[in-house]
Image (spheres, rainbow, N blue to C red):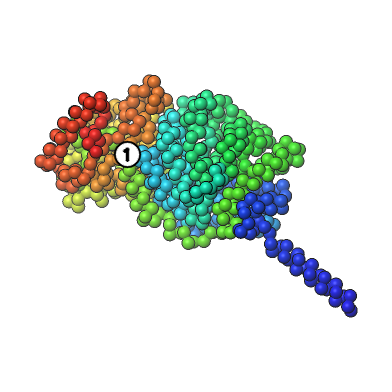
């Protein structure tokens, strides 16, 4: 009796001890330092669990069961990959949570991280605020604005339950023939460097004394960012996407690398490798740069992710020897592979490469340590599941106002009147009849560009927003009729008596390789529309494009020319400035060429002979009398006095500084 009592007590004690063990796992304790948590967790993981962490799959092939069975560490939405067309936040959040529950139901319960390309707002999501693409933001020269856009984007990404964005794009585009040029802030690396402040908005302001290279993500209302694509993607030969960047070490380090220095200092959590090659070596297999430079020299401590099928194209043709691709990619230093579909091939190959000793366990542990570091840092273990508390952030008024501000600041005024004292803009809000024409005036999809709802973008009402036509209509006086005709003919022009016209033309939407172009022409009817309209009535031309396009032949026909880039959903910003409620402040983030045979041509090149140079942008001071945009048809006396004053001053300055014909008198004055 006694002895059996004693054994019961022993058993109970053992049970308690075991329970105590089960209850206290260091890695689950947020009070433990992150490195302690990482070490504890890695010590418990099997090879399968580790390789699972290194795997990112597309949502189309993901399910709670797959997450659980393969210990998958990450899921992504590719361009346009949504749970349902026009899905509201609740559907997104449920989807992400379902996958997450699968991940949490594994033995160690390591949460997965979900990534999406929120490259100009949360752009795959219906109703999200779409900000101008990066080229337009580069024109603003306003890092604080871009940081605020980062904050808003983080909230709109969290609205869908997602914790990770593949942004910012920090390529320095050196050739506008490249289809991704609009994703680049500028041809000038210093502008790209300044714009990496978006990371502080996406991830949160980095604390002082934060160790350099260690990722930082502030919490539930922030997202992990991804600087991409490492490195030299903007310098490929002739601007061919995913091609070869031929450059010496000095060129690489002084043009394409600097934005990475800034991103790392700002605590960027992840970095994506480029499809492109560097002097013939595929970046996905470039050990010297990914491991030697990025990890060892720059002390980057976040994780390195491959691009979509990126390791596949280490061989030519892509996928010819997938085992070799896995070996070369992982050994180069890639920590997480965006597989994104055939994950069992990847997992099987990596498992056998490790068992054969071709990939070392220390390489696997390095990768997993980095992935876990990001997950711990951002509080994913404490808050793995999303709720609807951010749902009302999606497309909210304040974010649309911010986007509208960004649009206003991104506009670059390239021509205004045929001489400095005959300005055409701002336009009067009161007029007899205004014509709005062109392929891009009433097309929300076109003004958003690629990476908008669909990977390639779309045409027409792809989401909610304000077209440039709608914006013009709501800006002019009630008594002013606005007539819209996409591509009017001569007889239409002859039978209508317009006060003036606004012609909005540009490029159709595109992404990546589809956007590569050797002729850089605007959409077909555009030149015709400009010719027909501008020869019949005074006109302002607004170009909606991802880059400088062929425009020189038509410039003499028009009174004013405005580069609007790819403004996104808030077209109102265009009308705000055209009608003088705000001034023009944007400056060219790229050189505007005369003809494509000059390309590549960047500021500082010996053969520099642009139509409009890098940094060019006319201004108008909208606060001056006669420039209010209201009621200013015909010259007021004040306007006359102002214009004469300006011309006089500009003459003096032109003579003194040899500034030349580009400067607008108002620019010189203020
Ligand atoms: C995906 C994109 C991806 C592209 C790569 C598309 O099918 O939707 O996200 O960038 O493939 O080629
Ligand atoms: C693009 C990346 C993008 C990825 C996922 C790739 O094709 O190059 O920029 O993040 O697809 O959509």
The secondary element bearing badge 1 is classed as loop
| Quarter location, residue 303 | top right
The location of residue 97, given as percent across then percent down, is 56, 58
Q: Can residue 203 be seen here? A: no
* Residue 30 spot, x, y in % from top left: 61, 58
Residue 584: name its quadrant.
Answer: top left
Instruction: Say which quadrant the C terminus sits in.
Output: top left
- Tell me if 34 is positioned left or right of 130 in this view: right
Q: Which residue is drawn at 68% across and 43% down?
A: 364
Query: Residue at the spot x=55%, y=28% of the render?
Result: 278
Residue at 38%, 41% in the rendered image: 137
Q: State the image quarter where residue 1 is shown.
A: bottom right
Compare residues 64 and 164 and report the one nearer the observer.
Answer: 164
Percent across and percent down for residue 462 are 40, 48
Q: How crowded is mark 1: few (under 14 residues within 10 Å), some or many (20 or more)?
A: many
Residue occupying the far front of the picture = 209
Is residue 363 in view from this perspective? yes
Percent position of residue 604, x then y: 39, 25
Which of the two residues, 228 or 142, is positioned nearer the viewer here? 142
Horizontal placement of 663 versus 26: left or right?
left
Q: Which residue, given by chain and number where applicable, does mark 1 sit on? A: 586
Residue at x 65% of width, y 38% of height: 330
Q: Residue furthest left?
A: 637
Residue farthest top in this picture:
607
Q: Residue furthest bottom?
A: 1
Residue 525 drawn above or below residue 92: above
Count of marks overlaid on the render: 1
CB at disc 1 and ligand 2 closer than 8 Å:
no
């Amino acid at each position: 009796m006694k002895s059996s009592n004693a054994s019961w007590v022993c058993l109970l004690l053992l049970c308690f001890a075991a329970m105590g063990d089960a209850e206290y796992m260091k890695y689950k304790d947020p009070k433990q330092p992150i490195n302690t948590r990482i070490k504890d967790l890695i010590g418990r993981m099997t090879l399968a669990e580790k390789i699972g962490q290194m795997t990112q799959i597309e949502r189309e092939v993901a399910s709670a069961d797959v997450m659980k069975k393969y210990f998958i560490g990450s899921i992504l939405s590719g361009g346009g990959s949504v749970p349902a067309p026009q899905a509201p936040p609740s559907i997104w959040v449920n989807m992400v949570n379902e996958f997450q529950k699968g991940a949490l139901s594994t033995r160690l319960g390591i949460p997965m991280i979900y990534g999406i390309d929120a490259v100009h707002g949360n752009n795959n999501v219906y109703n999200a605020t779409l900000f101008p693409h990066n080229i337009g933001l580069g024109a603003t020269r306003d890092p604080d604005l871009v940081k605020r856009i980062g904050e808003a984007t983080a909230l709109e990404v969290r609205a869908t339950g997602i914790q990770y964005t593949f942004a910012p794009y920090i390529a320095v585009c050196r050739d506008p023939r490249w289809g991704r040029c609009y994703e680049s802030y500028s041809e000038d690396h210093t502008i790209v460097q300044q714009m990496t402040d978006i990371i502080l908005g996406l991830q949160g302001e980095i604390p002082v004394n934060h160790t350099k290279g260690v990722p930082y993500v502030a919490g539930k209302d922030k997202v992990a960012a991804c600087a991409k694509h490492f490195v030299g993607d903007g310098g490929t030969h002739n601007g061919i996407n995913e091609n070869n960047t031929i450059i010496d070490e000095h060129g690489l380090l002084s043009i394409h690398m600097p934005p990475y220095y800034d991103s790392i200092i700002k605590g960027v959590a992840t970095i994506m490798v480029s499809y492109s090659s560097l002097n013939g070596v595929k970046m996905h297999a470039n050990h010297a740069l990914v491991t030697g430079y990025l990890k060892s020299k720059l002390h980057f401590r976040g994780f390195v992710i491959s691009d979509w099928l990126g390791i596949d194209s280490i061989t030519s043709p892509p996928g010819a020897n997938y085992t070799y691709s896995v070996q070369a990619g992982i050994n180069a230093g890639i920590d997480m592979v965006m597989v994104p579909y055939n994950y069992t091939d990847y997992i099987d190959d990596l498992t056998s490469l490790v068992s054969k000793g071709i990939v070392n366990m220390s390489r696997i542990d390095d990768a997993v340590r980095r992935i876990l570091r990001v997950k711990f840092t951002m509080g994913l273990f404490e808050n793995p599941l999303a709720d609807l508390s951010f749902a009302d952030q999606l497309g909210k008024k304040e974010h649309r106002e911010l986007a509208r501000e960004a649009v206003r600041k991104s506009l670059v005024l390239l021509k205004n009147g045929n001489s400095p004292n005959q300005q055409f803009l701002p336009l009067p809000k009161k007029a007899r009849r205004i014509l709005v024409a062109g392929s891009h005036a009433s097309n929300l999809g076109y003004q958003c560009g690629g990476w908008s709802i669909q990977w390639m973008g779309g045409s027409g009402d792809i989401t909610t927003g304000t077209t440039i036509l709608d914006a013009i209509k709501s800006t002019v006086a009630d008594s002013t009729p606005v007539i819209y005709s996409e591509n009017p003919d001569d007889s239409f022009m002859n039978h209508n008596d317009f006060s003036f016209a606004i012609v909005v033309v540009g490029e159709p939407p595109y992404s990546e390789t589809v956007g590569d172009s050797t002729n850089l022409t605007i959409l077909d009817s555009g030149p015709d529309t400009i010719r027909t309209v501008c020869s019949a009535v005074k006109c302002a031309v607004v170009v909606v494009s991802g880059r400088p396009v062929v425009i020189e032949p038509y410039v003499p026909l028009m009174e004013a020319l405005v580069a609007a880039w790819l403004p996104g959903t808030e077209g109102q910003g265009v009308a705000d400035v055209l009608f003088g409620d705000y001034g023009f402040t944007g400056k060219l983030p790229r050189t505007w060429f005369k003809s494509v045979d000059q390309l590549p041509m960047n500021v500082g090149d010996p053969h520099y002979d642009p139509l409009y140079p890098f940094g060019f942008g006319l201004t108008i001071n909208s606060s001056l009398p006669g420039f209010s945009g209201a009621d200013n048809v015909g010259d007021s006396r004040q306007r006359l006095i102002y214009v004469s004053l300006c011309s006089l001053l500009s003459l003096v300055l032109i003579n003194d500084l040899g500034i030349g014909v580009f400067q607008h008198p108002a620019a010189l004055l203020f």
